[in-house]
Image (cartoon, rainbow, N blue to C red):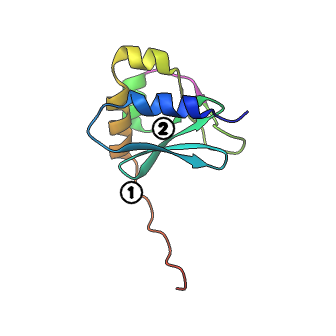
Amino acid sequence: MATSQTTADAILSLYTGGGEFVVKKLFGEYGAYLDGKIVALICDDTFFLKPTPGGRELLGTCEEGAPYPGAKPCFKLDLKALVASGRFDELLERTWRELPAPKPKARKGS
């Protein structure tokens, strides 16, 4: 089952921080990017945050799962509870800080 545009838009609207938060179609599902880094995947209408030590510290014990077969495990988040806690922005921003910068794309014709 693919993620609905409604779910992607709802997740996009949750972020109120100072960075640029966008969701983009990615292999039939969505990637969630903060200031150019992919920080999460939205698959089957579920939000999967890339795991980082800071994210684990903020979340405490949380469910983990693979967003698609063969993927590395991510934090599988219940957004309603996360929004109620008021930590969605903090969690995304901390994850962004701890993830490596994206690798530069290879130039065509090189």
Q: Evaluate whether residue 21 shows in this view.
A: yes
User: Can you tell which mark lies on residue 49?
Assistant: none
Q: Quadrant of residue 102?
A: bottom left
What SS does tag 2 mark? loop
Q: In this view of the protein, which residue sits in the foreground, 69 or 46?
A: 46
Return the x and y of residue 47 as percentages of the image width and height.
54, 31
Can you identify the residue that label 1 sits on? 101
49 left or right, relative to 97: right
**Residue 47, can we see it?**
no
Residue 81: x and y in percent read: 46, 15
User: In the drawing, does residue 52 fall left or right of residue 110?
Assistant: left
Residue beneath the point at 56% across and 23% down: 63
Q: Residue 91: horizontal and vertical position, in percent? A: 37, 31
Number of labelled discs? 2
Query: Is residue 97 rendered magenta in the image?
Result: no
Q: Secondary structure at mark 1?
A: loop
Say what amino acid the circle numbered 2 marks. Answer: Pro
Image point (34%, 23%), residue name: 87
Q: Do the numbered discs 1 and 2 sit on residues whose CB atoms are within 8 Å?
A: no
Task: Name the main secondary structure of what is drawn in magenta.
Answer: loop
**Label disc, if present, on residue 51 of the rendered structure:** 2
Q: Is residue 3 above or below residue 101?
A: above
Q: Is residue 40 shown above or below 103?
A: above
Q: Which label's residue is closer to the chain start, 1 or 2?
A: 2
Q: Amino acid at mark 1?
A: Ala
- Mark 1 and mark 2: span between their CA atoms? 15 Å
Q: Is residue 9 left or right of residue 29?
A: left
Residue found farthest to the bottom? 110
Q: Give, as a single range, the part of the protein colored magenta.
A: 60-64
